[in-house]
Amino acid sequence: MTLIFALTSQSQPNKENQLIHWQEAGLPKPTWFKPVVATISLNLIDRRLGHLDRSDWREVGKILATSITQDFLKGEI
């Protein structure tokens, strides 16, 4: 299984979710992370879009941790 999450090039209201190093990641446009997570089988992935910079990974991790914690406290997990 592989962990995947949503990315979008559509500007988002929460600027904290914008990837700073989107160009270095190989992404074609400014990109925002959406805290939507899923797992899929690795053989369903056709290609890799890019590779996130360590600082962007740290921010994604913080956002996911906050989102998961809030959902857990609300009883949604």
Image (cartoon, helix red, strand yellow):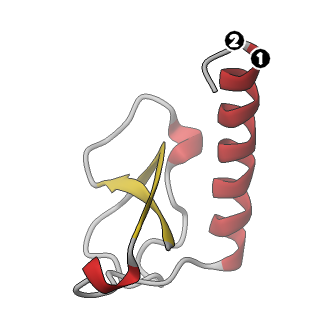
Front-lying residue, 42 or 17: 42
In this rendering, would 15 be left or right of 44?
right
Q: Which residue was labeled with disc 2?
A: 74
Callout 2–callout 1 Cβ contact below 8 Å: yes
At horizontal 49% and vertical 84% (from top left) the residue drawn is: 51
Q: Position of residue 2 (x, y in %)?
A: 49, 73
**Amino acid type at mark 1:** Leu
At horizontal 68% and vertical 14% (from top left) the residue drawn is: 75
SS label for mark 1: helix
SS label for mark 2: loop
At horizontal 71% and vertical 55% (from top left) the residue drawn is: 61
Eyeballing the image, is 47 above or below 58? below
Q: Position of residue 45 (x, y in %)?
A: 29, 81
Front-lying residue, 46 or 62: 46
Q: Position of residue 9 (x, y in %)?
A: 27, 54
Residues at marks 2 and 1, CA–CA distance in whole angstroms: 4 Å
**Amino acid type at mark 2:** Lys
Q: Which residue was labeled with disc 1?
A: 73
